[in-house]
Amino acid sequence: MKILALETSCDETAAAVLDGTRLRANVIASQDIHIVYGGVVPELASRAHMQKVSQVVRRALDEAGTPLSEVDAFAVTCGPGLAGSLLVGLSFAKGLALSQGKPLIGINHLEGHLFSATLEHPNLEPPFLALIVSGGHTLLVLVHDVARYEILGQTIDDAAGEAFDKVAKILGLPYPGGPSVQKAAEQGDPLAESFPVAKIKGRPYDFSFSGLKTAVLYRWRALAETGQEQALADIAASFQHAVIQALVPKISRAVKKHSLGSVVIAGGVARNSALRAAVLEAGQRDGFEAYIPAGEFCTDNAAMIAQVAALRLARGEQSDFSLVARPQMDLAGERARK
Ligand code: KG4
Ligand code: ZN
């Protein structure tokens, strides 16, 4: 079964071809136009998707050596994400499926992140614990099975990636913030500053990052006046350390409570090298196997969408052509669709 998948939920225009369990192509075109604005501008994002989508799909088919007529099913992210951006991928996928007379299936972007680690680890099967840490979400999810998800915790304010992006802005570092903060942190001392790690009463698995961001702002203002060069690196490293302290102990706690052996870390922030190291270390200490996808499968990509499509198509599911974009789609409501 050959699946062509499209992902256009935010600012990456992506297409992938999955042939059985083999990923034949994974094309990702990032949109640099947002850099000057320091964040994604929705109107520009949908326009850029419009400009790039057909070339990206063409490249994916060429790299896979798969003519369009040999594609057996078309998958597309239908939410959550930016409405205008989702619509570009959705309309394009509908057109392809209609023209080829092949099935169409809409996929939840978050479900893609949940299963992104199975691309490199095909033997990884539920149940497992998954932490999605991206620009829009911070979710701790118990994956019982495909389409059976239990959200253990989530952020009550900023997402982890959003905190990285905001802190980068405070420190005057370029967008996207995650990689810039990581780079600055490499020269700093993670214990130089003691930033707060939020604990939410009665909700052991929920997260909060807005207090941390504010603490960084005040400390940076105070230190910037002293003109110390080392201050920026130390603040970046200490902030990163506080984010890791907010995430990793909750993973260990959930693994113990639910007697799980496997943990998946997914989403853009899972690219962070200090977080990756901390999760691997916790796995060794607390007896779980950590599955962290290669960088290209952490940030938004269409391979993960194809992967979930394969699982759902195998269950006899598909979407009809009235499929709409669902910008606020969540995981809790994700059930088998027939
Ligand atoms: O999953 P993703 O590509 O898009 C969403 O679905 O949101 O995640 C993007 C987020 C951004 O906030 C970006 O700053 C963050 O992932 N990110 C990182 C790193 N690389 C990307 N955060 C921390 N460290 C990194 N190395
Ligand atoms: Zn994402």
Image: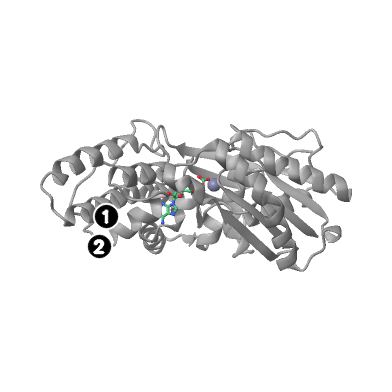
Q: How many marks?
A: 2
**Label 2 is placed on what type of residue?**
Gln
The residue beneath circle 1 is 237
Mark 2 or mark 1, which is nearer the start of the sequence?
Answer: 2
* Up/down of 43 relative to 292, above or below: above
Q: How is the image coloured?
A: one colour
Looking at the image, residue 168 sits to the left or right of residue 42; the answer is left
The image quadrant where one finds the C terminus is top right
Looking at the image, residue 124 sits to the left or right of residue 63; the answer is left
The residue beneath circle 2 is 187
267 and 337: which is toward the camera: 267
Rendering coords of residue 65 (x, y %):
77, 68
Residue at image point 64% right, 57% down: 303
The answer to whether any part of residue 146 appears in the image is no
The image quadrant where one finds the N terminus is bottom right
In the structure shown, which secondary structural element does the residue marked by tag 1 occupy? helix
The answer to whether any part of residue 157 appears in the image is yes
Rendering coords of residue 140 (x, y %):
48, 43
Dot 2 beta carbon under 8 Å from ligand 1: no
Measured in 3D between alpha carbons, the distance from the residue under mark 1 to the one under mark 2, in whole angstroms, is: 8 Å
Residue at image point 38% right, 59% down: 282
Residue at the far left in the pictured view:
226
Rendering coords of residue 315 (x, y %):
78, 48
In the structure shown, which secondary structural element does the residue marked by tag 2 occupy? loop
